[in-house]
Amino acid sequence: MYQPKGAFKKKTSATSENGFAKNPLIYKANYISEHEKSEIFAYLDTLFPIWEMRYSKNNPPPENQKQRSLLRPVYWLGNWQFACLNYYHPPKGIYDRCVTAERFPPVLQHLIHKFEAMVKEHYDPRDIPRGWNLNTCLINYYGDQILENGKRLDCARVGEHKDFEPGPVASISFGERALIQFVSSRNTESKSTVVTQQWLEDKSLQIFGGDKFKKHLFHRVQRVDTKEKIFFPLKEISNFETRRINFTFRYVPVEHIVPFSYLAETAKEDVRIYMEKLAEHSDFFKSQI
Ligand SMILES: O=C(O)CCC(=O)C(=O)O
């Protein structure tokens, strides 16, 4: 049959049948304005991040592991996924993991709307779950731990992992640049292979989603530069020098987010210590315990 030239759009390997780029990885340098950055930092100045332990009385370390603290202080917005409750991990790990937390400040809510619009524009609708919105944020503080003998321990990294919250994730970075790597899964014989990597610079935005970046590949923060000698002081945490702050925005279905008082008794017992710590400086957390 005669096919007139240009009558159909040639499908390229980077485009799916409905015309969306396949599993795009979006990176925008300097996405956050100086004004937004200063508003975000004014907000950060009101937060008291905490340093959680990975395990707890009711969730002790497995046989081959020891109790340990996380590599860095954190703060969560929207809902708090305490490490000792094992994070949100569908399909099985969905209950007693996401505890209602503080709302986003206006400057972040405004950015979130823009990220959501960008996702809807660039991603295949099949990669955006029904009800998806960026209602959860993990704030990670990266830097050096200052040991009792005064020596410093560079903890500014994250081991390879997946973010199990469904749908695309948006991430903004401040401070020293960090090398994020998307890697194929490690097996017992070989090391994992870097599939793609990106330096995340001050004020940058990264969005990743789709099966490739969310389901197949792992990601890790390999290192954080020390070039700029940037240092963000943290309230009440004196044995840590922060040189990078990252916000990752994710989606947890609202039916899986519960107020502290609705948690199972064991989960409540395990995280009460953190809730009390947070309540020392937050009317919201005070109202929850
Ligand atoms: O710090 C980053 O850029 C990534 C953080 C991350 O991998 C995570 O929060 O799951």
Image (cartoon, rainbow, N blue to C red):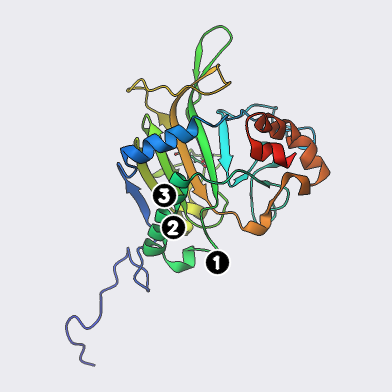
Please tell me which residue is depicted at 51% across the width and 46% down the height of the picture.
185
Query: Of 225 and 289, which appears nearest the observer?
Result: 289
Q: Mark 1 highlights which residue?
A: 130
Q: Mark 2 highlights which residue?
A: 116
- Which residue type does callout 3 highlight? Leu
- Which residue type does callout 1 highlight? Arg
Q: Quadrant of residue 279?
A: top right
Please tell me which residue is depicted at 65% across the width and 32% down the height of the picture.
278
- Which residue type does callout 2 highlight? Glu
Q: CA distance from mark 1 to mark 2?
A: 13 Å
**Label 1 within 8 A of ligand 1 by Cβ:** no
Residue 70 position in % (x across, y down): 60, 29
Residue 108 position in % (x across, y down): 46, 46
Mark 2: secondary structure? helix
Q: Residue furthest top?
A: 149
Query: Of 205 and 226, which appears nearest the observer?
Result: 205
Q: Is residue 46 left or right of residue 119?
A: right
Q: Quadrant of residue 117?
A: bottom left
Q: Quadrant of residue 193?
A: top left
Mark 1: secondary structure? loop
Q: Which mark is residue 236?
A: none
Please tell me which residue is depicted at 69% across the width and 30% down the height of the picture.
65
Q: Nearer the viewer, mark 1 or mark 2?
A: 2
Q: Mark 3 highlights which residue?
A: 111
Residue 260 position in % (x across, y down): 73, 44
Query: Of 127 and 5, which appears nearest the observer?
Result: 127
The mark that comes first in sequence, 1 or 2, is 2
Q: Is residue 178 left or right of residue 271?
A: left
Q: The C terminus lies in which quarter of the figure?
A: top right
Q: Is residue 234 left or right of residue 270?
A: left
